[in-house]
Image (spheres, rainbow, N blue to C red):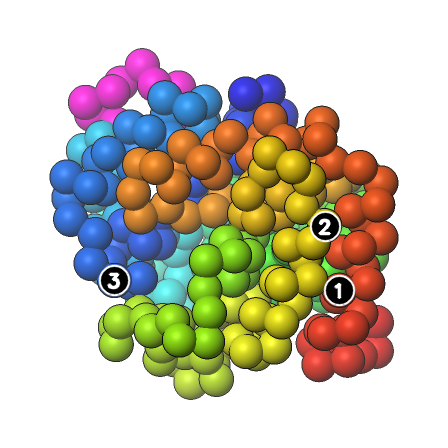
């Protein structure tokens, strides 16, 4: 798999990474052995970036990755974790003392003295404009607690504010054929500033896998069951904030655009990583076969024709534009 520089980190990563929220068992149970096989399959397929967070399974995802890294010290994997969701979401909690506590825990979980990349985990909007927050992050870089920091955002406005910060190495944002708004300003701004873009929820929580139907049932403790209305956390994290049934109709039309030889998911991922400004996309995988299939999407970019771009926009305008952001 080709490699791309992840923004201001100066490190190279694969255009298809691995999101590991599911390894924390927040998408249904994933056993430790199955989780290790997912990491094995991803690395064997050329994936060189794992994304996690301290709240995925209350640290379970980090711990699983840490154990895997200890067993594969020369794998060349860059790990990005996230912090900030372990306390009530008020700006006052984003302070140096809390950062130290959270990162000490993540360092223990991951078995790393210095963390590769730490991202603020969708903090309250005022945090992005608080110089004290970024001064604290700079201090932790100077101290060797972490090598780089970035942010995971909910809105394009937050992304643009973060990109303007000279110490921000990367921005993680939701972007996929059903969530196009970042194309307008965020991707060009990041590209101009040399900031990496990490695309999360690239398959719209599995909608763009093409495997769901109106009869699909998700487990009670799967966020795709309990967070469709955003009652537990930001609705954008579940099916990219689009209505599930409407999303199924959109998937049916998207599938008509899929080039021969690619699955629905692979076409969506290939399209995402082909967009200027995108560094890496981080689909999740609950088993080794999914991890390998996702990684293979990197080879699908060359099969995409110009008609796919137009088709993606037509589907988006028909099903989502008015509902998701009509002012765009």
> As rendered, which of 107 and 238 lies closer to the eye?
238
Q: Which residues are magenta?
A: 69-78
The question of residue 74 being in magenta is answered with yes
- The number of callouts visible is 3
Figure quadrant of residue 129: bottom right
The question of residue 76 being in magenta is answered with yes
Callout 1–callout 2 Cβ contact below 8 Å: yes
Q: Is residue 89 left or right of residue 323?
A: left
| Residue found at x 23% / y 42% | 35
| Residue found at x 32% / y 71% | 218
Front label number (1 vs 2) = 2
Residue 90 at x, y percent in the picture: 45, 77
Circle nearer the N terminus (1, 3): 3
Q: Marks 3 and 2, how far apart in space? A: 31 Å
Labelled disc at residue 46: none
Residue 292 visible in the current orientation: yes
| Residue found at x 54% / y 21% | 1
Task: Look at mark 2 in the image and give the residue it sits on.
Answer: 257
Task: Look at mark 3 in the image and give the residue it sits on.
Answer: 28
Above or below residue 59? Residue 269 is: above
Q: Marks 1 and 2, how far apart in space? A: 10 Å
Front label number (3 vs 2) = 2
Helix, strand or loop at label 3? It is loop
Q: Is residue 207 left or right of residue 105?
A: right
Residue 24 at x, y percent in the picture: 26, 55
> As rendered, which of 79 and 212 lies closer to the eye?
212
């Amino acid at each position: 798999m080709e490699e791309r520089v992840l923004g201001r980190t100066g490190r190279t990563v694969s255009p298809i990474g691995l999101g590991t929220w599911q390894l924390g068992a927040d998408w249904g149970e994933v056993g430790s052995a199955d989780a290790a096989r997912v990491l094995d399959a991803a690395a064997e397929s050329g994936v060189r970036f794992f994304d996690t967070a301290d709240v995925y399974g209350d640290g379970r995802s980090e711990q699983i990755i840490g154990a895997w890294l200890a067993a594969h010290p020369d794998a060349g994997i860059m790990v990005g974790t996230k912090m900030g969701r372990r306390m009530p979401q008020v700006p006052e909690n984003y302070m140096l003392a809390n950062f130290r506590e959270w990162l000490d825990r993540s360092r223990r979980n991951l078995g790393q003295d210095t963390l590769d990349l730490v991202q603020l985990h969708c903090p309250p909007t005022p945090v992005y404009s608080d110089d004290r927050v970024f001064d604290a992050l700079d201090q932790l870089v100077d101290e060797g607690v972490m090598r780089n920091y970035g942010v995971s955002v909910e809105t394009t406005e937050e992304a643009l504010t973060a990109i303007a910060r000279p110490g921000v190495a990367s921005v993680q944002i939701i972007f996929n054929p059903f969530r196009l708004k970042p194309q307008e300003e965020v991707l060009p701004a990041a590209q101009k500033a040399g900031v990496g873009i990490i695309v999360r929820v690239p398959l719209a929580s599995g909608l763009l896998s093409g495997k769901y139907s109106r009869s699909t049932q998700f487990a009670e403790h799967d966020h795709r069951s309990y967070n469709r209305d955003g009652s537990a956390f930001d609705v954008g994290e579940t099916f990219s904030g689009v209505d599930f049934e409407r999303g199924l109709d959109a998937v049916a039309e998207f599938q008509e655009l899929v080039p021969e030889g690619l699955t629905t998911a692979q076409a969506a991922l290939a399209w995402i990583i082909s967009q200027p400004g995108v560094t890496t996309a981080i689909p999740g995988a609950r088993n080794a076969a999914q991890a390998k299939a996702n990684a293979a999407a990197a080879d699908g970019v060359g099969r995409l024709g110009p008609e796919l771009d137009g088709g993606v926009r037509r589907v988006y305008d028909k099903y989502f534009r008015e509902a998701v952001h009509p002012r765009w």
